[in-house]
C-alpha cells in the first residue's frame, strides 16, 4: 500500500488566499531587508578573515569550557569553540588580528604553545581580509549569475510572465532566508552561500513543475478562468509537491540532528529554504500570473467548468 500524504483529486482553492499571501510575503521581505541593514549578518571567518584551527584532544570527551577559558586567557579577541566530529575533536575560530599576517601567525603560535601538550593539531587555516573580500564578491556574483541565467532559461521555455513570476518568488526566498540568518545571528559563511544556491535550485524546480502543468492546462482549457485554472493545476501537482518536500525535509532533519555542529547552520538554512520554497511555489509563483495578466479576460468560471466537464467525459471509459 502506497503512502499518500495528500489524497488524489483535491479541490483546494489557493488563489483566493493571494489577498493574504502577497501582503504577508511583502511584509516579511521588507522586514528582512530592514534587519539586514539595521542589524547585519554575522559574517564568519570566510568573509571577515581570521584563523580556523581543528584539534584532537588527548581526553575524550573534550572539555570545551576549559579550552574556551584557556584561549580567552591568550587575549586574542573573539574566539569560538565548538565540538567537531567526534567527542574528542574541537574546532576553534579566532577573529582577524590587528597587524596583518604577522599578527595572525603570532596568534597561531600562542595557541600552539599553550595546547601542544594536550592536543593534536589537525588543521590550521589563516584567512586574510583580502581573500575574505574576494570570497564575498565571488559569492555575490554566483548568486546574481544564477538568477540571470535562470531568468533567460524560463523566459525561453515559457512566456515572459512565467519568467518574471519565477524570479520574483526566488528573490523573495533569498531575502527571507537571509532574514533568517540575521534574526538568529547564524554564522554566514561560504557554506551559507552554497545553501542559498541550493535553495534557489530547489525552489525553482518546484516552481517550474507547477508552471509546466499550468502551461499544459492553458492549452487544454482555453475558456477556463485563470484563477480556476491555477487552482486546478496546483491541485494536480499537490501530491508530488508535498511528497518531495517531506522526503527532503526528513533527510535534512536527520542531518541537522546527527550531522554535527559544522553543518548545522547549513542544514537549518536548507530546512527553512525547503519550507519557504514550497510555500512560494504555491502561494506566490502561481497567483503572480494573475497579477501579470497572463490570460487577459480569459473566460468565466462557468465556461471553465464546462471545459473541465467535457474533458472528464472524453477521458472516461466507454
Image (cartoon, rainbow, N blue to C red):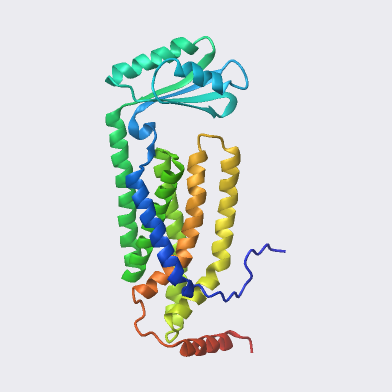
The residue at the far right in this view is 1
**124 w.r.t. 296: above or below:** above
For image coordinates 38% across by 75% down, the residue present is: 290
Q: Position of residue 153 (x, y in %)?
A: 34, 61
Q: Position of residue 180 (x, y in %)?
A: 44, 48
For image coordinates 52% across by 19% down, the residue present is: 67
**218 w.r.t. 107: above or below:** below
- Quadrant occupied by the N terminus: bottom right
Q: Position of residue 123 (x, y in %)?
A: 45, 22
**33 w.r.t. 52: above or below:** below
**192 relative position to 142: left or right:** right
Residue 212 visible in image: no
**1 relative position to 246: left or right:** right
- Quadrant occupied by the C terminus: bottom right
Name the image quarter holding residue 245: bottom right
Name the image quarter holding residue 94: top left
For the residue pair 231 and 179, the one nearer the viewer reads as 179
Amino acid at each position: 500500500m502506497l503512502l499518500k500524504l495528500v489524497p488524489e483529486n483535491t479541490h483546494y482553492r489557493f488563489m483566493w488566499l493571494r489577498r493574504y499571501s502577497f501582503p504577508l510575503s511583502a511584509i516579511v521581505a521588507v522586514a528582512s531587508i530592514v534587519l539586514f541593514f539595521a542589524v547585519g549578518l554575522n559574517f564568519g571567518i570566510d568573509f571577515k578573515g581570521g584563523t580556523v584551527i581543528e584539534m584532537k584532544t588527548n581526553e575524550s570527551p573534550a572539555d570545551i569550557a576549559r579550552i574556551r577559558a584557556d584561549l580567552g586567557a591568550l587575549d586574542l579577541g573573539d574566539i569560538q569553540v565548538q565540538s567537531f566530529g567526534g567527542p574528542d575533536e574541537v574546532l576553534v575560530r579566532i577573529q582577524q588580528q590587528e597587524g596583518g599576517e604577522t599578527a595572525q601567525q603570532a596568534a597561531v603560535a600562542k595557541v600552539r604553545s599553550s595546547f601542544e601538550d594536550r592536543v593534536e593539531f589537525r588543521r590550521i587555516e589563516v584567512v586574510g581580509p583580502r581573500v575574505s573580500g574576494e570570497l564575498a564578491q565571488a559569492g555575490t556574483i554566483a548568486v546574481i549569475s544564477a538568477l540571470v541565467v535562470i531568468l533567460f532559461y524560463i523566459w525561453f521555455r515559457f512566456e515572459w510572465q512565467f519568467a518574471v513570476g519565477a524570479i520574483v518568488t526566488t528573490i523573495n526566498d533569498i531575502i527571507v532566508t537571509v532574514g533568517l540568518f540575521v534574526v538568529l545571528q547564524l554564522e554566514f559563511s561560504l557554506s551559507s552561500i552554497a545553501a542559498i544556491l541550493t535553495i534557489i535550485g530547489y525552489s525553482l524546480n518546484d516552481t517550474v513543475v507547477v508552471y509546466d502543468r499550468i502551461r499544459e492546462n492553458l492549452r487544454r482549457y482555453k475558456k477556463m478562468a485563470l484563477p480556476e485554472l491555477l487552482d486546478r493545476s496546483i491541485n494536480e501537482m499537490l501530491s508530488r509537491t508535498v511528497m518531495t518536500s517531506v522526503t527532503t525535509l526528513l533527510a535534512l532533519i536527520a542531518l541537522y540532528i546527527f550531522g554535527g555542529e559544522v553543518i548545522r547552520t547549513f542544514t537549518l538554512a536548507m530546512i527553512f529554504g525547503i519550507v519557504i520554497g514550497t510555500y512560494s511555489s504555491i502561494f506566490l509563483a502561481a497567483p503572480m500570473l494573475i497579477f501579470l495578466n497572463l490570460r487577459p479576460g480569459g473566460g468565466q468560471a462557468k465556461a471553465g467548468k464546462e471545459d473541465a466537464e467535457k474533458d472528464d467525459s472524453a477521458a472516461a471509459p466507454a
